[in-house]
Image (cartoon, helix red, strand yellow):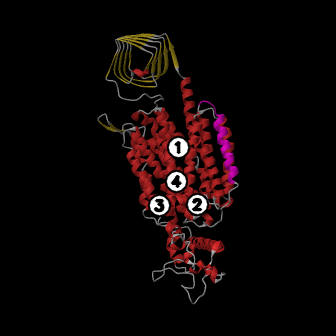
Amino acid sequence: CADPSSSLQHLNDDDDYAGMPSNDGGYYRNDSRANDDEGHSDSTEGHDEDDEIYEGEYQGIPRADSGKAGGMDGVAAIEAQQFRDLSAFEGERRKDQEELAQQYETILQECGHGKFQWTLYFVLGLALMADGVEIFVVGFVLPSAEKDMCLSEPNKGMLGLIVYLGMMVGAFVWGGLADRIGRRQTLLISLSINSVFAFFSSFVQGYVSFLFCRLASGVGIGGSIPIVFSYYSEFLAQEKRGEHLSWLCMFWMIGGIYASAMAWAIIPHYGWSFQMGSAYQFHSWRVFVLVCAFPSVAAISALTTMPESPRFYLEVSPSFRSCCDEIVSKRKSQHVWNNFQTVFSPEYRRTTYMMMAVWFSMSFSYYGLTVWFPDMIKYLQKQEYASRTKVFVKERVEHVTFNFTLENQVHRQGEYFNDKFMNMKMKSMVFEDSLFEECYFEDITSSNTFFKNCTFIATLFYNTDLFKYRLINCKLINSTFLHNKEGCLLSDISDENNAYMIYFVSFLGTLAVLPGNIVSALLMDKIGRLRMLAGSSVISCVSCFFLSFGNSESAMIALLCLFGGISIASWNSLDVLTVELYPSHKRTTAFGFLNALCKLAAVLGISIFTSFVGITKAVPILFASGALALGSFLALKLPETRGQVLQ
């Protein structure tokens, strides 16, 4: 298979297209001045001499003899003539673009699908894999990072959402820029930003600096999805375009599996760490963050060997630029903004609004539920853990040394005399209305442990993390705190098994999309994008109602896998449809905008759905099913793009 870009010269040599450079450094003109022997050119065929487009007229400069027309009638006639000329030019330009698209499709069919396309498939797959990894990084490191950074619940929530906000900005910016400076160059820049800040985030110590690095990393990776699908689609012939784009979606799943496996293998190994004094600490979770930057770095290295999309080169060639040369000289940011506005031009307005609604409804329900599932599993785990709590009332303990772990216990109205608590851990321990007299606490590490309404008499706390804010309404009489441990007040259960469960659930949820990926790839070009999108959305909507039966941890995991496996077909269809609905010079701009809207909907869905954890299942179920039903209905109103040439 030949590289399609090598066939680009055939189009550039075609003198049917005006404005291509000539040997004498000028441009071929399709008027009588350029070809005195041939008469009128194709672009003015069917017009008399008065209807020919005068070069200055398009720029608003009337003919020299137009000054003879006087009064308002003359001005109106000139304006009418200019309008007809512009309309004629626009029609010719549209016809030329359609012919270009058909010729480009013919070249792709002649090249076939071979070694080059498969090589590009794996290169762009690495970039898509990096996007999948980015989604999971923060969620996996939070249980460990909160210990190092003393994160409060609001801080943890912001850290979880900041990646989506960064990806939202990145999708819009890089998508618009890719239509201006090229797919390959923009993707290299965005992946470089992602790699650099992902690397820095593994070393920074403070919460604010870590938050900024993850935000910047998200901005970088935000360009991955809009550019990757647009870039790859422009090397694919129409017969198998939907299938191969669906196969490309597999790499997002591979990214999730990679992140889960690396978290499972690295984070629990707390021995993989070092520290320089008390100010700088590098724990195992930071190694995991560093390893998660590898797919992005690999994508950059491989992408440098790939060519730019030849379709992009054709779109920016002189024959298909806008005749208003002043647009070319505008700043890139202004050009990107102007190109974004054309997505809402009358020709594309209805399509864009419909796509906005479908993208928003899909993202709102999918991301809301996929984050709600793990939170519900944690809630069920806490309920089950609380059901095993042991309660001790009015116990009296004297001259006893506790040097073993105390966990998940409540002690009420106890009396402790001359007891020692040494070299031990306290997990989810509560002492209420108890008396501690002449006791000794040394080298204590605690989590979710509190003393409420207790009295301490002549008691010494040495090298413990039992800070005074763990002592609620307590009385301290002749008691002393010496060499307190530096650390944070952790409200969650510190349990390695719980961390393993998070990685395992994410691994299963990601792996569950494999059947949906395979089915969508095999059927995408057979049943069409709309049927795939609407059908998958309807089945996902129906599956939401099974959530009411998820009253155990295993049931919630099974439902998570079911929902993910079904809904992935909708995402694959939506990606293919977005690529094919917009022309090349608007493709990544429109895709980037819709993907940015997707991330905004994700933030809203996550915030709303998680607020109902432990309160009710009905609201998340109704929200998710309603959004999916709306998305499937609107999807049927979109035009089918199967078998069509890329605009």
Q: CA distance from mark 2 to mark 1?
A: 41 Å
Q: Earlier in the sequence, mark 3 or mark 4?
A: 4
Give the residue pinned by disc 1: 507
Res. 320 in view: yes
In the depicted structure, whether residue 54 falls above or below residue 126: below
Task: Give the residue type that dot 4 points to.
Answer: Phe
Q: Pointer 1 and pointer 3: residues touching (CB < 8 Å)?
A: no
Secondary element under disc 2, as helix, strand or loop, is helix
Give the residue pinned by disc 2: 342
Give the residue pinned by disc 4: 172
x and y percentages locating residue 331 in the rendered image: 46, 61
Give the magenta range: 614-635
Q: CA distance from mark 1 to mark 4?
A: 30 Å
* Quarter assignment of residue 146: top left
Secondary element under disc 4, as helix, strand or loop, is helix
* Label 2 vs label 4, nearer the camera: 2
